[in-house]
Structure formats: C-alpha cells, structure tokens
Image: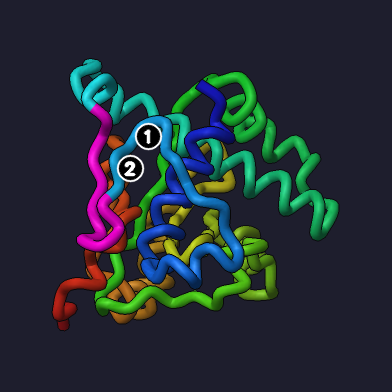
Amino acid sequence: MAIEVILREAFELTRNMVFTNQKKRSNHYARFKSNFFKLNVENRTFSLKQIYSIRPGFQQMIARQFKRGLFKVFLEELQRQLGMGMGDRFNFIREFARYDLGDYPVFYLVPKLPVLAYVEEEFIAPRLNFGPYQLERIDAYEFYEMNIFGHAFLIPTHKNWHLNYDAYLANVNNYLSHEYKKMIPINAFEDVDFACEFMNSKGST
C-alpha cells in the first residue's frame, strides 16, 4: 500500500473534519471518498470500514506507512527548499521511507487547548517550515517538529536519535508543556487525532 495513499487518507480526514461546512469545502476541495474509512463529518468521527477493521494488525500497518510518509515529506521538502536533503546523515530516512528498512519513531503532540492552529492556505498548499529555530534544533539535537494540516509531530533526524532525546526534551520542555498535553509515539493509526476530537473538549491546564 503506497505511503502517498495513506498520507492523503490521513490528512483528508482532518481537512474534511475542519471544513465541516459543505459549501466552504466545495470551494477548494473535491468531495473526499475514503478507501478505508467511514466519515461522519457532522459528529466529527470516523471509523474503519468493516473489511479493514477485521484485518489483524491493519491499524499498525497503516501507522507505519504514515510514519514513512512523514519522513519522506520531510526529506523532500528539506531538499526542495534548502538543498540539504541529500546528505549521508539522512541515509537512514531514505532507507526507511523508500525501502521500509529499519524502524524509527514519530511522536504525535497532543494539543492542550481545543483549538486547531492553522491558516486555510495550509490546507490547500501545505508547506513545512525550515526557519532558523527549526534548523537550530536539527543541528543541536537532531529532531524536527513538523507542523502540517494543523497537527504537530516530532521526528528524529539522526539514526541514533535516542542519544539526544533526553537533552532535546529538557531544552524544549517549557514550550512543549505549555502547548501540548503529552507526546505519544505513533504505533497505531488511531494514536493520532485526525478527526480533531480534541476540539470538542474544554482543554486542560
């Protein structure tokens, strides 16, 4: 199953949940018909179609494909924007994203407040941010915080990511604890709140 298909399915879920007004959705987006999910836009919920829900390990399989897709997007955008994506330091990402070799974590940052931070243009033509802050974190700690379709993910940019993990968290703890409830390693597709159900809550302090 192509990782591009999984990425599209995942983020189309969010796009359709955010733009719940049918007229507004039709201005920019074709009607989304998912291969894998049944959507209830009004209630902001979705579920796997039965043929997939009974398949053992399907949630874990598409989660792995999703993670590979995020690494692929990171490397392609780093190369497209800055010409920095071809270095040997990123060989492990190429091996994982292209050939499914190895296994590397992607962390989902769960928002603290019931607000999805985005501008509409990001849902039409998403673009990763490689500003000075992001590049500093990559150079110093080998981690990149990816904001895409209103969601925040943390991905390692070094094969031995665990060596800098604690130092990175110590450096950004105040910021992360202010913005997010917790950080979840993605193991199953349902670990990510693609339906933006957190927007129905009252938040947390």
- 23 vs 129, left or right, is left
Near-viewer residue (182 or 55) = 55
Label 1 secondary element: helix
Three-letter code, disc 1: Ala
Residue depicted at 56% across the width and 25% down the height: 2
Q: Are marks 2 and 1 in contact (CB under 8 Å)?
A: yes
Residue depicted at 42% across the width and 71% down the height: 171
Q: Position of residue 14 (x, y in %)?
A: 40, 57
Residue ID for mark 2: 186
Residue depicted at 47% across the width and 30% down the height: 65
Q: Position of residue 27 (x, y in %)?
A: 59, 68
Q: Which numbered disc flags the more N-terminal residue, 2 or 1?
A: 1
Label 2 secondary element: loop
Q: Position of residue 79 (x, y in %)?
A: 79, 49
Against 188, residue 143 (above or below) is below
For residue 115, what is the image quadrant?
A: bottom left
Residue depicted at 45% across the width and 55% down the height: 154
Near-viewer residue (28 or 114) = 28
Three-letter code, disc 2: Ile
Near-viewer residue (30 or 35) = 30
Near-viewer residue (15 or 27) = 27
Query: Does 42 appear in magenta?
Result: yes
Please state the extent of the stretch shown in magenta in the rendering. 40-49
Q: CA distance from mark 2 to mark 1?
A: 7 Å
Residue ID for mark 1: 63
- 186 vs 55, left or right, is right
**Badge nearest the viewer, 2 or 1:** 1
Q: Where the C terminus falls, by quadrant? A: bottom left
